[in-house]
Amino acid sequence: MIELDVAFRLDRGNFTLDVAFTAPGLGITGLFGRSGCGKTSILRCVAGLERAAGHCRLDGETWQDDAKGIFLKTHRRPIGYVFQEASLFAHLSVRDNLKYGMRRVPASEHQIAFDEVVDLLGIRQHLERAPSGLSGGERQRVSIARALLTSPRLLLMDEPLSALDHASKQDILPYLERLHDTLRIPVLYVSHAPDEVARLADRIVLMRDGQVQAIGSATEILSRLDLPLAQDTEASALIEGRVQSHDDNYDLTRVAIPGGTLTVGRLDQATESRIRLRIHARDVSIAIRKPETSSILNVLPARIVEMQEIDRSHLLVKLCTAGEPHPPLLARITRYSRDRLKLEPGQEVFAQVKAVALMD
Amino acid sequence: MTLNLEPLWLTLKLASLTTFVLLVIGTPIAWWLSQTRSRMKQVVATLVALPLVLPPTVLGFYLLLLLGPAGPIGKLTEALGLGTLPFTFPGLVVGSVIYSLPFLVQPAHNAFEAIGSRPLEVAATLRASPLDRFFSVALPLALPGLLSGGILAFAHTVGEFGVILMIGGNIPGETKVLSIAIYDHVESLEWTQAHWLAGGMVLFAFLVVLSMNLLGQRMRQIGQD
């Protein structure tokens, strides 16, 4: 199993970075935190663009180890790096940009075919153009493809969407999700947008003031009420499910989740396929008795685990669903409702889920 | 009237050779200045800029001493069997290179700095070694700056007078370049010949500055893309 193992210490007067963590060899590890908390510095240290004290290993191969005096230069590390701005070479066509890194890797180490990547990112029609003629989203797709074509063993992405407008972001997210399913390499994904992290990350490293505040699976970190992700207006929980059946008459899909089923608008997924669903806290309400006469289809038995006020009028309720392994749900309700329903931790209730989003 | 064109060809030969030598030695200096964090950076940048403010006669005077038979470089060239450089064409090239150095190095330095560190970092993450990065990224991106530096250095060498008079003198076919020839014609009251050469210089200068401006405009357009 490929595993990334890093420890960095950096002291720059008013900023101190001191982190150590490991990331699994598959899937996306989100480095999440506010601007200036050191997320980008970690990525730059892993790439060797900056040098902090410590070590950096991938799958037992050492890229940096101060104790042994090892420090591999950036161009000797098998990484792919996607910067915040696409940073395409202005003097080269899209095709030559794509081939720049590919040409510098021995053919015997090529893992990903040119045509495959070009199609995966939907940039075939732009190959002969100059980078200046592309939109922001298209440029960023080219820069992702360019990084992938070096057949990296670790992909580093530094807020690849933050310089894009909303439409370009929506345009590029499906491609990133596709990468997540297709690539068999680990990805370190830096972001300060909770929405991106929730959509993409399998694991989250939560950063604060140059230190790791929390680390764990996305499901766990997203639903921890003491951490900032749950306090965001986009707060949400992730639930793994299995497509059970499609209802052609009403154009609906039934998804089996631990402890129940969810009925959602028709999904383009084969039955039995495993999917990841995201449920926003603002789309979940709480009932004491099972509502019999509601337009809301999805009502799940659940138990209140924890409650936390997020402002003077609202609070966040962490629920745990009935079935193993009890995936958590978040509900955002008013303080008034809590007092009226006399909700308290440990209580058995029903969670009414108004909307569900498919993640991949 | 007979117009001797030998000074013109000599001038073009001197300016071309000087520009070539400058591109070869000035480009690495400009690259070093744009990348280094050394404390020597400002000292080197100042030395390179010195010919801009020194009177050409001062530069010529010290070059004469250094390159002459009693000077350290003169002794070296004599020991190598090359003879001494003053009052020879190679001597003029050495003088012109030093005199025009800032005209190449400063635009080239600015062009390299304008690239910023990002394209070079990107190239490093795409497996390009430092030398590879210089040739495949820095040089092509800085090309307009190098080109305008080359044109400036060429034009500046064509217009050189003081340094040449000091270390080259007035030897037909060897060191008698255009500016010296014009001076000669005026001294001997050959106004027609002086007019032809001087008028040609004005036209040449106009074309050089015009091409620089057009190049600058294109660079700004590319920059906006």
Image (cartoon, coloured by chain):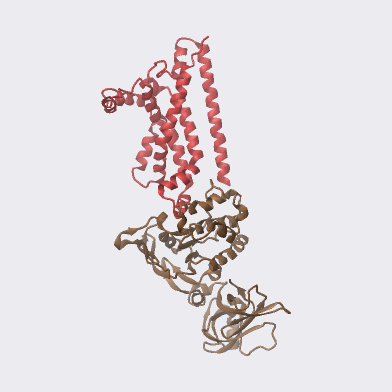
**Relative height, residue A128 to residue B67 (above, below):** below
For the N terminus of chain A, the quadrant is bottom left
Q: In which quarter of the image is residue A51?
A: bottom left
In-front residue for pair B80/B159: B80
Count of marks placed on residues = 0
Q: Looking at the rendering, in which quadrant would you find the C terminus of chain A?
A: bottom right
- Which quadrant of the figure has residue A348? bottom right
Give the chain coloured brown.
A
Q: In this view, does B224 lie to the left or right of B73?
A: right
Which of A253/A297 is in front? A253
Q: Nearer the viewer, residue A240 or B92?
A: A240
Q: Find residue A316 and report its horizontal and vertical position in percent.
A: 55, 79
**Does residue A154 appear in the picture of this structure?**
yes
Residue A354, x across and y down, in percent:
64, 79
Give percent across and percent down for residue A290.
Answer: 64, 89
Q: Please name the residue shown 43% across and 59% down the image.
A: A78
Q: Chain B is drawn in which colour?
A: red
Height in image: A89 above or below B196? Answer: below
Give the residue at the far front of this rendering: A108
